[in-house]
Amino acid sequence: MSISRADKERLKKSKKAEIQNLLYDKDLLVAQRLSAKNIQEVNLKILKAKKELKAIEALPEKDSDSTTNIIVNGSNINQINTGTNIGDVNQYNGERSVFWNSIDYKILEKELSSLHLEMKKRANTDDQDIALAEIAKAKKAAKEKNIEKVIETLKFSGKWALDVATKIGTTLVAEALKIAFGLK
């Protein structure tokens, strides 16, 4: 199996961003002196993401006309030119797919708006402002019915967004965040 150079670079860039996010989350957990269990969970996710990055880097490159959706951790990353699956990287989770494909965009947008307003009231650090911006992007993507962009932005919104979503009862967004983070 092989992959075009451009698609390989896009996958690598996406996976590297995921690793950076996880490292950032780990730093936040350490700074907040949260439990070792939480830090260990993030460490395991970092190791898994690094393993997936190595699998992507090991893919041979070639030009091809056949197109396959590559799904990493339940998220459709891109349309990739490839002839077959790429092992651990192509992790298709039917339950996640059903969740994302059955989302009511109006409810999602409404809940993201509620979450955004509440986070705006509570934000008092730079990290929280960053999370707020990601939720704003997710809200815009939901309005445009762009599920890939919703998933991508939710992944970068952080634990604080999940905590606030859970506290204010935006259950659809809380579930979407858990799935985007790979917690479900």
Image (cartoon, helix red, strand yellow):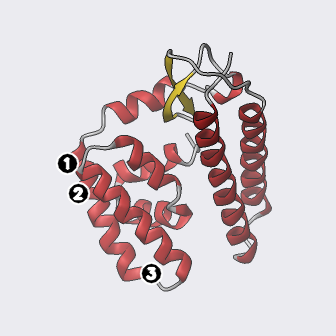
Image label count: 3
Q: SS class of the residue under badge 3?
A: loop
Q: Which of marks 3 and 1 is nearer the N terminus?
A: 1
Residue 113 lies, with reference to residue 69, above or below; the image says below
Q: Find residue 36 and report its horizontal and vertical position in percent.
A: 79, 61
Residue positioned 76% across, 71% down in the render = 30
Circle 2: residue type: Lys
Circles 2 and 1: CB atoms closer than 8 Å: yes
Residue under label 2: 110
Residue under label 1: 106
The crowd level at tag 2 (other Cα within 10 Å; few <14, some 14-19, many 20+) is some
Q: Find residue 81 and report its horizontal and vertical position in percent.
A: 54, 23
Q: Which label is found at residue 123?
A: 3
Give me the C-alpha separation between circle 2 and circle 1: 6 Å
Circle 1: residue type: Lys
Residue positioned 44% across, 46% down in the render = 151
Residue placed most toward the observer, 178 or 54: 54
Give the quarter of the figure containing the N terminus.
Answer: top right
The crowd level at tag 3 (other Cα within 10 Å; few <14, some 14-19, many 20+) is some
Q: Find residue 94 and report its horizontal and vertical position in percent.
A: 48, 23
Residue positioned 63% across, 25% down in the render = 3
Give me the C-alpha separation between circle 3 and circle 1: 25 Å
Determine the residue located farthest toward the bottom in the rendered image.
124
Residue 142 lies, with reference to residue 60, above or below; the image says below
Circle 3: residue type: Ala
Q: Earlier in the sequence, mark 2 or mark 3?
A: 2
The crowd level at tag 1 (other Cα within 10 Å; few <14, some 14-19, many 20+) is few
